[in-house]
Image: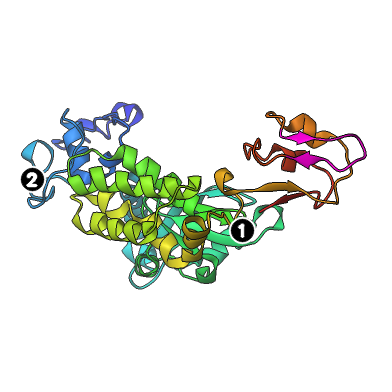
Amino acid sequence: MQQAEAAGWLGQDIGKRGFSFSIRLKEGAGAFVCGEETALIASIEGKRGMPRVRPPFPAVKGLWGCPTCINNVETLANIPWIVQKGAAAFAALGTKGSKGTKVFAMAGKIQRGGLVEVPMGISIRQIVFGVCGGIKEGRKLKAVQMGGPSGGCIPFELQDTVIDYESITKTGAIMGSGGLVVMDDTTCMVDVARFFLDFTQRESCGKCTFCRVGTKRMLEILTRACEGKSREGDIERLEELAVRVKNNSLCGLGQTAPNPVLTTLKYFRSEYEAHVNNRKCPAHKCGPLLTYSITDACAGCLLCIKACSVGAITGERKRKHVLDPSKCNRCGQCYKVCNVSGAISVD
């Protein structure tokens, strides 16, 4: 901005043609809810970042009551390219309904993470295995979570889904801010839903009851499931709450916060049933649901005894050790340090 002003391309009397245009940078408050346009406008005006009912829409009445064009930086950044190359060149990229490119922040269990820019219409498989080099340690792809904290989880069975707005919406996920988290077969999908809902619940501005209270109740159910404290009917209760919060919240935060829950319920319901009905975590990630035991393969190396901080394991060198389940805190350290395959069983 300073360079543009110094060169005479920004500010007063640009090019000495009587046209003036100024830009001012406003640092945001860091609230997730300010990704919603009316909440962002309120924040810029110095008010608490909370959404308002629309209409009027920002294009009619926005910042300080004036008509306002409010878009993501990614959207606005396309304008110079389109001006230079032409609309036809931009429309040549992507699909019929979703033109151009999309930037994704790649994270999770992939060989190469970071920012990637890909044309609309590329498949999830092409991004994960082509652009990013596949899954770490040669493990299997289980799912990708797309759209940021309020996005949805897409299972590996749908990895050939093309990335455009229509196709992604059909899966239950959203394009959102372009976050794409890759998960392998060691991931617990119930815990994933709990993790993302914990964030969106804390970021709720609290203005509407469905988002403020509904996400809290949903998080309580998910936490109980991961801690082995589920109650009868929790899955049905969770699903009902998710639908109500999605359909009745005021802004995009509440309307999309249930997405991780609804998509994992849709594609990974068996994992919820295992957590709630059987008190088991199939991915062996939720500590309170795991049971550790020492098998006959134990070589008596003492490593697990040294690693156990609560004294749950006893034994002598070169003799099978014994694990007392009443003392075990399920930290998993014994399993991590054991160097004999199958000596410690996790169920």
Residue at 75%, 32% (x, y): give it. 307
Secondary structure, magenta segment, majority class = loop
When the figure is inspected, residue 70 is found, relative to residue 143, above or below; the finding is: above
The residue indicated by pointer 1 is: 185
Q: Are marks 1 and 2 in contact (CB under 8 Å)?
A: no
Residue at 40%, 67% (x, y): give it. 171
Image spot of residue 147 (x, y percent)? 40, 53
State yes or no: residue 316 in magenta.
yes
Q: Nearer the viewer, residue 50 or 280?
A: 280
Crowding around mark 2 (Cα neighbors within 10 Å: few <14, some 14 to 19, many 20+) is: some
Image check: 234 left or right of 281? Answer: left
Crowding around mark 1 (Cα neighbors within 10 Å: few <14, some 14 to 19, many 20+) is: few
Q: Nearer the viewer, residue 56 or 220?
A: 220
Residue at 56%, 55% (x, y): give it. 280
Image check: 232 left or right of 158? Answer: left
When the figure is inspected, residue 327 is found, relative to residue 220, above or below; the finding is: above
Image check: 120 left or right of 332? Answer: left
The residue indicated by pointer 2 is: 61
When the figure is inspected, residue 344 is found, relative to residue 10, above or below; the finding is: below
The segment highlighted magenta reads 312-323
